[in-house]
Amino acid sequence: MSSRADRDANLATAGRLVRRAAAAGARLVALPEKWPFVHGPRTREGAEALDGPSLAAAAGWARELGVAVLAGSVIEAAADGWVHNTSVLVGPDGAALGTYRKIHMFDVDVGGVAYRESAATAAGDETVVAEALGRRIGMSVCYDVRFPELYRRLADGGAEVITVPAAFTETTGRDHWEPLLRARAIENQAFVLAPGQHGRHDDGTVSYGRSMIVDPWGVVLAQVPDGEGVAVADLDFGRLEDVRARLPALRHRRL
C-alpha cells in the first residue's frame, strides 16, 4: 500500500487489503512499515499508544477474519516526546503475541534525500521471536535487513518465518531489496515475509514496493508488481525442514 499522512484513509485501505488477503486463503497477513501514517518531518504527529486506533483496527480484523496480523509497524508514542518504530504481531483472537521496536535507525543520504530517523525515533534494544499459528516468527523492520547478525539471533531463537515490513526507498530498493531479502532467507534457512510501502508519500519520499515472500532456499514464491496489491503463498514447512536437514549450515557454524 501507499500510506500518507491520513490515518483514517490508511486504515480503510489496510482493512480492504487484509480482507482481500484473507479471502485468498491467507492465515497470516502482514502489513508494511508505518502503514497507518507516513510523513517523515511530521513523524511525531502520527504517534499513538499501542492501544490506539491502528492496533485496535488490526486486532479487530484478526478477530473478524480469524487470521493472525503482522501490524507492520506503527509510530508508538514513547516517553519525553520520542517515538518508537514498533511492529506488533496480533493473534486470531486479537491479542498481541509479540512487540518489536526497530533497533537500527535509518540515518542515511540516498537519492538526494537525507533521512534521519533517529531525529525523532528512539531505537529499540531487544530481538523478538514470537509464536503464532504454531510457528516461530522472528520480527524486524526495514533497515534492519542490512544487519545479518540480527537475523542470526532470530534463527538462534528458533525463527521459522521472518517478517520485514518496510518502506524501502526507491533508490536503494531497485538494487538491494530482493538480494537482501533472499540472503536473509538463505543464510537463516527461514521463510521471509516482506510487505513494503510503494509510491510517493506526502513528504515527497518514494518507496520501492515489490512486497514479496521468499522461501528458505531463497526462491521468491510471490511478489506484488508495481502498485498496490497482495502477495499470497503457501509456506511448506516440510520444505524448510528438508532444506535444514540436507544443507545443515546452521548446525555447521563454528563462530
Image (cartoon, rainbow, N blue to C red):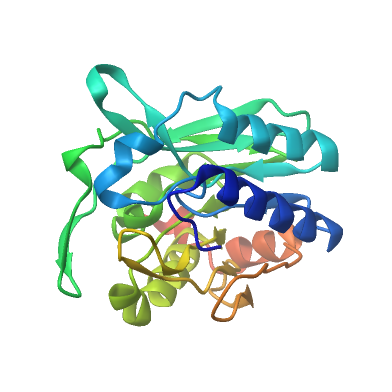
- Which quadrant of the view contains residue 170? bottom left
Could you tell whether 150 is left or right of 13 in the image?
Answer: left
Question: Residue placed at 19% from the left, 42% from the top?
Answer: 118
Rendered location of residue 35, percent (x, y): 51, 50
**Front residue of this view, candidates 125 and 77:** 77
Report the side of 196 relative to 14 (left or right): left
Considering only vertical position in the picture, is 197 above or below 208?
above
Count of numbered tags: 0
Question: Is residue 255 among what the camera can see?
Answer: no
Q: Where is residue 219 drawn, in percent x and y?
A: 58, 77
Residue nearest the viewer, comparing 125 with 19: 19
Residue 24 image-quadrant placement:
bottom right
Depth check, front residue: 91 or 83: 83
> Residue sitting at 36 percent across and 81 percent down?
174
Residue 77: x and y, percent?
A: 37, 26
Task: State which quarter of the image contains the N terminus.
Answer: bottom right
Figure check: 246 above or below 119: below
In this orientation, does residue 29 appear? yes
**Residue 56 in picture, x, y percent from top left:** 64, 29
- Residue at 28% x, 18% y: name it: 79
Instruction: Tell me where residue 245 sits by quadrant.
Output: bottom right
> In this rendering, is residue 243 above or below 140?
below
Q: Residue at x 32, y 56 (%)?
A: 143
